Amino acid sequence: MNEIGLITDNDLYTSSKNDKYYTNGLEFFYRFLVKNDQEAINKNILEFRIGQYIYNPRTIKANDARLNDRPFAGYLFAEAGRTSFYQNESVFKVAVQLGFIGVNSFAEEMQKEFHAIFNYKSVQGWQYQIKNAVALQTNFLFSKKLFVKQNKQNVDFHFQSKADLGTIFTGVSAGFLTRISIKKVLPVYDSNLYGGSVLANSQQNDSELYFYIVPGINYQLYDATIQGSLFNDSSPITYDLIPFRFNAESGIKYRKNNLNLSYAFIYRGKELKNDLVTGYFYGSIAIAYLFK
């Protein structure tokens, strides 16, 4: 089996008035099974992805530099990743990204075209965006199922940790994930929780519908979309980070036969040292299709 899909992030998916900071994201991905010779591993999935992230201040009318409480920035990347699903329902993913931050991300053009198509207000202030830099990222995710011997079949708990190292983002995060379902939850290696719906058997007869929540702590060492490039200080507007943040995510994931759907509400704590800045939230919608 193979899986192809897209993920779209936008603050408008949570509120028409909440339009700031991480304002839009778009990703396309393709997943497929690869060879597995280890008994401890249920399966390995290889994934390719392209994406773009767009960041704004709290106002899009920011021709005055003093109104840029967060820098304009864009990140364009291509990714290759491998996820190993273990028989004990642990998950380990490693991914590498190559791309650009700055003008070469085409974030300005993307946002202005989007606003023009839907007759939204024009965006002003992109002349202050973070300058061009090459992106080389490595990203890691590890998840471990907790309370393995519990009798409840419609609820499970997991410890989840992430680490990013690269020229755009460097940081670590950890939290606890809970899945709650009306019926028995699928094993993580067959669930869409971490993209495990791609099965060796082409008969996709299982279905799932569950709510999940993931509160966590993030320690961010570096963020080029706020601080500018590691290799130059030419960006006109930058800020120092607030390294410790509280983050949270909750949502609903659904699968029926070949179709995967999900919606998530995502909160990010205050990220930078500016008295005007607050935490923020956005929505994420994903749709994917499984095929032979």
Image (tube, rainbow, N blue to C red):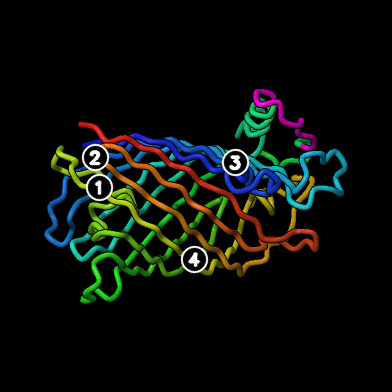
231 over 163 or under it: above or below: above
Q: Secondary structure at mark 4?
A: strand
Mark 1, residue position: 207
The disc labelled 1 sits on which kind of residue?
Ser
Q: Which mark is residue 173?
A: 4
Q: Which mark is residue 24?
A: 3
The disc labelled 4 sits on which kind of residue?
Ser
Q: Closer to the observer: label 3 or label 4? A: 3
Q: Secondary structure at mark 1?
A: strand
Residue sitting at the far top? 117
Q: Closer to the observer: label 4 or label 1? A: 1
SS assignment for the magenta stretch, majority: loop
Q: Earlier in the sequence, mark 3 or mark 2?
A: 3
Q: Secondary structure at mark 2?
A: loop
Q: Residues within 10 Å of mark 1 (few under 14, many from 20)?
A: some
Kindly check if marks 3 and 2 are in contact, taking CB atoms under 8 A apart as contact.
no
Q: CA distance from mark 2 to mark 4?
A: 33 Å
Q: Earlier in the sequence, mark 4 or mark 1?
A: 4
Q: Which stretch did the figure color magenta?
A: 116-125
Q: Which mark is residue 162?
A: none
Residue shown at 63% from the left, 63% from the top:
269
Q: Earlier in the sequence, mark 2 or mark 4?
A: 4
Q: Secondary structure at mark 3?
A: strand
The disc labelled 3 sits on which kind of residue?
Asn
Q: Earlier in the sequence, mark 1 or mark 2?
A: 1
